[in-house]
Image (cartoon, rainbow, N blue to C red):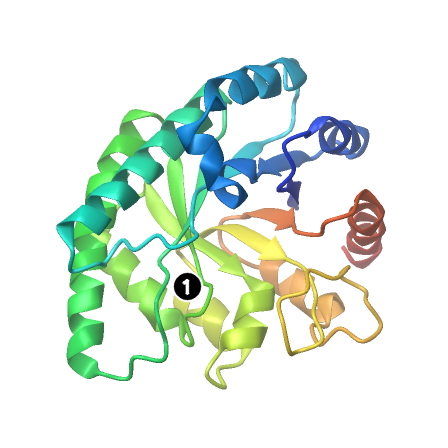
Amino acid sequence: MRLAIATPRPDIAPYVALARDYGIGIEIQVYGYHPGLLDGDWSSLVAQHRRLLQGFEGEIALHGAFYDMSSASEDPQIIRVTRERYLLNLRIAAELGARHVVFHANYLPWIRNARYLRRWTQRQVEFWAEIGVEAQRLGLIVALENMWEPSPDLIGRILDGVDSPSVRACLDVGHAYLYSDSIPFTGWLARLRELVVHCHINNHRGVEDEHLPLDAPDGVVDYSLILPLLGSLPVPPLISLEMESLDDLERSLRFVMEVV
């Protein structure tokens, strides 16, 4: 099982150390969770991260910008800003030696309109096909993550339309349980099975996206069942543990090793 730990913090040193201890990878999320960096001295932080990652043998991934991003906007200026953000994320990922870059499609499930969904899907296909060309040039794979999408078909139809090995899926297990429209997790796996290259795993109580440890006693996701399902995917994805604290990450890593 290909594992990584995620961190949204600028100081990745303790997370790199933990990843080295366990012989796993790291997903660097600060360039997505702190988008103001992209208008500042991001190159200095990249240089710092490159130094910390020297000799790092685990896989490296990056989470891109997602706050207020709209890759299917009707407004060309919004599309321009979103594209600029994502292209910069790709550049940073390449400089850090990452392989996967996670982005969100940011579907708004409260808009219940078939015409909106058709147009949204077509604009997403056009946008990600263009981003995919740049990702391929840089040797990267874009992984589209489900967030508020109530059905795996929303991401699935985009990826079917783009039809590129450089644009694939990031299956977020917690989001599938929290925002899904009564679709069981096995349904998500069945629809996205051949498309998943990256996963996010954490737990929650079924109300909000809390990023609890995998074995949280009041968590709604039973990872003793989920982890074997993820392990059965035809191409093993990079499975990234998303918790805030090092203690929760290490606790969850121990749980994974007991289950698998």
As drawn, is 69 to the left or to the right of 67?
Answer: left
Q: Is residue 161 above or below residue 39?
A: below
Q: Which of 165 and 37 is in front in this view?
A: 37
> Can you give x and y, in whole percent of width and height, for residue 152 in the image?
40, 70
How packed is label 1: few (under 14 Cα within 10 Å), some, or many (20 or more)?
Answer: many
> Can you give x and y, in whole percent of width and height, for residue 83 in the image?
26, 41
Q: Is residue 232 above or below residue 208?
A: above
Q: Is residue 223 above or below residue 186?
A: above
Q: Is residue 44 above or below residue 27?
A: above
> Can you give x and y, in whole percent of width and height, for residue 179 in the image?
51, 75
Q: Quadrant of residue 22?
A: top right
As drawn, is 117 to the left or to the right of 51?
Answer: left
Q: Dot 1 corresponds to which residue?
A: 192
The secondary structure type at the circle numbered 1 is helix
Q: In which quarter of the image is residue 157?
A: bottom left
Residue 185 seen from this side: no
Quarter of the figure that contains the C terminus: bottom right
- Residue type marked 1: Leu
Residue 171 seen from this side: yes
At 46% across and 37% down in the image, what residue appears?
Answer: 36
At 34% across and 67% down in the image, what residue appears?
Answer: 107
At 16% across and 56% down in the image, what residue appears?
Answer: 75
> Can you give x and y, in whole percent of width and height, for residue 85 in the image?
34, 38
At 30% across and 55% down in the image, what residue appears?
Answer: 70
